Amino acid sequence: MKSMAWMVLGLLVIVMISGILYYFVHPMFGGSFKGARLERMKQSPNFRNGVFHNLEVTPSLKSDVNVVTLMWDFLFKKTPGLKPLNPLPSKRCDLSNLPKEDLIIWFGHSSYLLQIDGKLILVDPVFSENASPIPGSNQAFKMTVDYTALDFPKIDYLLISHDHYDHLDYETVVKLKDQVGHVVCGLGVGAHFESWGYSPDQIIEGDWYDQMKLAPGFEVTFTPARHFSGRRFTRNNTLWTSFVLKTLKYNLFLGGDSGYGKHFKTIGEQFGPFDLAVLESGQYNDAWHYIHSLPEEWGAEIKDLQAKVTLPIHSSKFALAMHGWKEPMEKFYEIANKEHIAVITPQLGELVYLNKLDTVYAPWWREVD
């Protein structure tokens, strides 16, 4: 009996070690930083002691937070309405035959498509079923229309705000590889794309306040965010960013994940006002106050940015925090009405025309269980 027990224990140890080794070598974790890329990272004023830093002191957790209690609540505390009971309503459109107009389509969480002057710009696409390296741990909500990477035509520019799994999805970007013209991302993130078969010539990496002309009439500026990065165990080894996209017709703020900070006002003063700000508005928790803004700060962010219209995102696809899935949309809607802020709340997959940003959208989430 003892020998049998030792055999079982030995097999369990082998399985555990094999699993750990599998994850260490799995390509989803991305590339390493070396050569000219590493040297450029070291030259950044935001890079010190081997990692990138925020402009303000930014703890990952508030000092009064008990980590054990937080993890216990996250794993075992039941939150009413954490996930929708039924598929979320979403609209089907033929992405290869879009109307010849400037528009934006939000697909849930932080994934959206911009079409401006005939160019297609895809931001933070996540079209696999999981926003985590652990299978089944962060599964996407069911939707009435499921878009996949195979639905997309040629993408001129793929913008990546940072390398967390709910923004940079290995399965999606590998499937998109032959469809992408150029990747625009923060310093270091290009190493992941090169490890996944993208050409160095496709990759445009930038530091905060770098300005780059993508094409005539298309200029992107890398702007700060207050967040963090990392795909394995080392944090902040690549740069997280937001973007200002200026075209002949529009001035857009494309926000990545960020806690509230002085950078919003700086961006608004230097690059605003904005015709549209695409702004994080979900997956928050008071414990993460420094790295994800709270509802009571959204109005200040919009005013600091000088945004004429705001599209709230980072919700309606994954349950990464402990609030109900409807809460971010409802709170944003209420704040916008109270503070007289122009907000658009399209359904997932709905065409939003940039020359009609005054369109009023119904609070669709209220009709979903």
Image (spheres, helix red, strand yellow):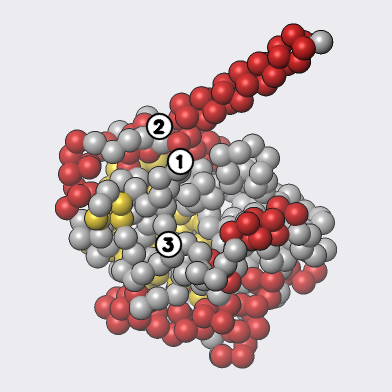
Q: CA distance from mark 3 to mark 2?
A: 25 Å
Q: Which residue is mark 2?
A: 196
User: Which element is circle 1 on?
Assistant: loop
Could one spot residue 255 in this view of the protein? no
* Residue at the (33%, 35%) spot, across then down: 32
The image position of residue 105, as x and y in percent, is 55, 59
Determine whether 173 is above or below 319 in the image.
above
Horizontal arrangement in the rendering, residue 26 relative to residue 225 (left or right) = right
Residue with the mark numbered 3: 227
- Above-or-below relation of 63 to 119: below
| First-in-chain label (3 vs 1) | 3
Q: Residue 40: percent from the left, percent from the top?
A: 19, 47
Give the residue drawn at x 74%, y 9%.
3
Residue at x 31% of width, y 69% of height: 55
The quadrant holding residue 37 is top left
Quadrant assignment, res 67: bottom right
Residue placed under numbered mark 1 in the picture: 232
Residue count near mark 1 (Cα–Cα under 10 Å), binned few <14, some 14–19, many ≥20: some
Q: Is residue 38 visible?
A: yes
